Amino acid sequence: MWFAVGGSASGPAQARAELRKALDKPEAAIRGVVRYREGLNERSDVSLPGNPLLARSVAWSKQMLAASEQRVEDLKLRAVRAGEAYPPPVGTLKSMRWLGAGWPDYTWLFGTDGEYTAFAAVAAGQFGPIKDHLRALRDVSEIVNKGSGKIVHEVTPDGAVYFGTNADPGNTDESSKYPSAVALVWRSTGDKKFLKDLYPASVKAMKYVATLDEDGDGWPEGLGNVERPGMGEEKLDNAAYTIRGYADLADLARAVGDGETRRWATKKAKALLDKFEDDWWYDADSARSYADSLDDPGNEKVFQRHWIGLTPTDAVLPKMPGRPSAPLASDEHANTTLTQHERPCFTGRLGLFHTGTGPTSAPAGNPGPSCDSVVSAVPSERSIFTLNSAIAAVSEGNFGRLGADQQGRYIRGNARSQLDPDLWEMPGAMPEIVPSPDFGANIDRLFTERSMVMQAWGAYGVLWPVIHQWLGVSPDLGRDRVAVVPQLPAGQTKASADSVKLGVFTIDVAASHQGSTYRTTVTRHGRTDLRIGTVLPDGATVASATLNGSPVKPKLVRTTRGLEATVWAQPGQRTATLVINIAP
């Protein structure tokens, strides 16, 4: 027995027509969907013998992204001021495709959600939807914000811009993150047409962010990811992603030959880099963390234990003059704060709290342990959002911290929320908030108090660590090259992924570590330059190395992940196998 629902924004006749179409050949329609989903499953097809839970999570995360695809036609765009107004449309869009943020309530086009989800989408090889998502953000923002460069925050499927117009106070972070999302997709696809199309919007976005600096200190004011009271005017996540935004814009400008913008963006990025640690590191009262915000006037550091404390360890900057590609945070401060955030005042059984516990002047008091002596003015919030854990997982991987009680804890929590019958609400779907001390289980809450049963951005904490960090796939296809430099966690002696999509072709990657031998194999199903390697243990000495059986001398570079040993593969060899033996 077949059930169908037909609907239309243009009246009952079209709704009935859609219903008839849905019921005409339902078996064929379902077969078409299944073929499409099976094709997506074959991309980035992962084998993790030491971690079957995570391998299943990768597979389901790809399906979760596919289930998030949305498309509408004939939108009438209007600014509704968070639902308080319903003015006439300011413009129209013929069509819009995007990755919906969360189900059932927030199937909308979001800026910040999509910019995090972009990392998961490119790791899964699902390029089309995220390209269209970024185009949709550009199109809606251009019309509603009249070309100011400000990227809208959220847009409902009927074209209502709920928040993020020029008249709204925020958000700053999605404008800062926009050029980085564009750069990510361009590097993953090498799509010059895409770059040319969205480069002007990327320039406008950072020019707009530059206007938000009311006190002239370089840090933009405005709302960020933490939508809570009591924060200073300048937020840590805005600062971190603004530096990365300038750096990525400079890289895009170099690719399109825009020397003036490249010089401007590079100067902006370097000026903020030079003072970031001094301005933001909270070195008092055993905080061992970055300040959450700066309070004007005087840039007084405010520490409230929000999850954005890890955004400097999450944000990776591209190569700049005098600086290799690396995370924003200094190595010393990153490892200090990551260790601090692993403690029970920040991290629970299933991941990172929204706001950690500790001394506070808030009336509710402190319900948990204290790991520092800073007296915060806000209460803790021990709700574990899958995005928070994703940020923590990626941050740990950026610094080679892959242990079970480091990155493993955050990845495992997100994966269990999809696949553990004791936790899941909808099998295979990663929720917005996992069972948490201050939230409980989603399924037990009132419908008006629930979080999303499926939230796309949590996939960032599964797909990106496995494909980019464990298997080390780092494409730069805008310049026709890719690096594959794996780093496997303890207990994972081998891992592989077939059909990792890069632009219009794929590569197969396999990595293994047995005793003192490290092996990386890459098969290219297309033409691109390849730098192949592995991450070696601290203090390791290379005893011998071969590439396809011939002796080679790897280049050794100390990075935040560890000691990277790499060589350039020969262009004509479809399969490259690098074997490195280290001295005992």
Image (cartoon, rainbow, N blue to C red):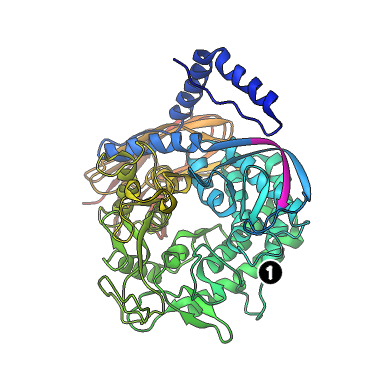
* Residue 296 location, quadrant: bottom right
Q: Residue at x 65, y 39 (%)?
A: 191
Q: Is residue 308 left or right of residue 161?
A: left
Residue 516 vertical position relative to residue 254 in the rendered view, above or below? above
Is residue 77 part of the magenta span, yes or no? yes
Q: Residues within 10 Å of mark 1 (few under 14, many from 20)?
A: some
Instruction: Decide if residue 225 is in sight here.
Output: yes
Quadrant placement of the N terminus: top left
Q: Position of residue 548 (x, y in %)?
A: 39, 33
Q: Which residue is mark 1?
A: 210
* Residue 71 location, quadrant: top right
| Closer to the camera in the image, 26 or 289 | 26
Residue 165 vertical position relative to residue 56 in the rendered view, above or below? below
Q: Residue at x 35, y 75 (%)?
A: 288
Callout 1: SS: helix
Q: Residue at x 31, y 56 (%)?
A: 436
User: Main SS of the magenta segment?
Assistant: strand
Q: Position of residue 76 (x, y in %)?
A: 74, 44
Provide the residue span drawn in magenta.
72-78
Count numbered badges in the picture.
1
> Identity of the amino acid at label 1?
Ala
* Residue 405 location, quadrant: bottom left
Q: Position of residue 82 (x, y in %)?
A: 62, 58
Residue 219 vertical position relative to residue 317 in the rendered view, above or below? below
Residue 318 vertical position relative to residue 182 in the rendered view, above or below? below
Extreme-front residue of the structure: 12
| Closer to the camera in the image, 488 or 564 | 488
Instruction: Decide if residue 480 is in sight here.
Output: no
Q: Is residue 84 left or right of residue 308?
A: right
Q: Position of residue 59 (x, y in %)?
A: 39, 34
Q: Residue at x 51, y 41 (%)?
A: 121
Is residue 584 part of the magenta span, yes or no? no
